[in-house]
Image (tube, rainbow, N blue to C red):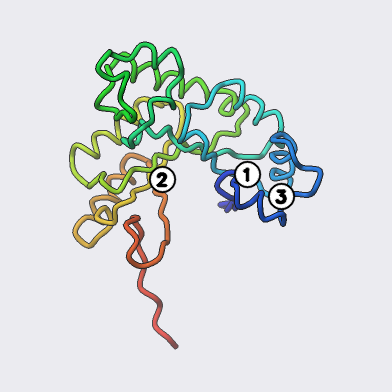
Amino acid sequence: MSEILVGTCSWTDPTLIESGRFYPEWARSAEARLQYYASQFRIVEVDSSYYALPNEKTSGLWAQRTEDRFIFDIKAFRLFTQHPTPREAFPRDVRQALPAELKDKTNLYLRDLPHELTDELWKRFEHALLPLDSAGKLGVVLFQFPPWFYPGNEQRDYILKCKEKLPQYRIAVEFRHNSWVNEKNIERTLNFLRDNDLPYVCVDSHRGSNRACHRWPKPPRT
């Protein structure tokens, strides 16, 4: 029998903390908040890994502070989903190794970096998730692609490259442009995801949003 888990995006979301309605008074530290959150939910999406590379020590602490059946879904680092990435988001030694023409740029894209640096970042991201994976607490690695990531052969090939970079983990895909699931492309998109065992993350957002979402027709009234 399948199991449905319910959770939130980040246990340290500012609105969750500032509301004062979720965490008890004693849960003020990062450790206490995670432990309390894990006592109420069994899954969470880690949002911080989008903004900066996680590290093994931190993910090891997450694994230690949660119950055995707790699951972390990890959002992929923004560089890997082709978002502009502030230079300061990179580890210090990687910033120092940047070519001279990149050291003064505020934001960098994946296409800007030398292959040896991108390979190093992929390796660090993979290693950072090992403690969660070893503890059986890693769910999926979520690749949340930007609105300018349109459907095409190059984009599909890149998604498969992401999967190859993290062979021992399961990746999931979210599209932020609805052309992936319009009438022209939805069948091809879903077949591509199904054929490559890629879970599809879909946001059901308000009309006019540029996020990819698909609303099935409402059932007829009886």
Q: Amino acid at mark 1?
A: Trp
Secondary structure state at the residue bearing disc 1:
loop
Q: Splitting the image into 4 quarters, where does residue 211 fall?
A: bottom left
Sequence-wise, the earlier of marks 2 and 3 is 3
Secondary structure state at the residue bearing disc 2:
loop
Q: Splitting the image into 4 quarters, where does residue 55 fall?
A: top right
Q: Is disc 1 in contact with disc 2, using a CB cutoff of under 8 Å? A: no
- What residue is shown with label 2? 199
- What residue is shown with label 1? 11
- Residue 222 in the image: state x and y as whole percent: 44, 88
| Vertical position of residue 149 compared to residue 138: above or below | below
- Residue 83 in the image: state x and y as whole percent: 33, 37
- Residue 72 is left or right of residue 164, and the answer is right
- Residue 14 in the image: state x and y as whole percent: 60, 47
Distance, label 1 to label 2, CA atoms, is 23 Å
Question: Is residue 170 or residue 58 the one in the foreground?
Answer: 58
- Residue 143 is left or right of residue 2, and the answer is left
Disc number placed over residue 40 in the picture, else none: 3
Question: Is residue 208 or residue 120 the one in the foreground?
Answer: 208
Numbered disc in front, either 2 or 3? 3
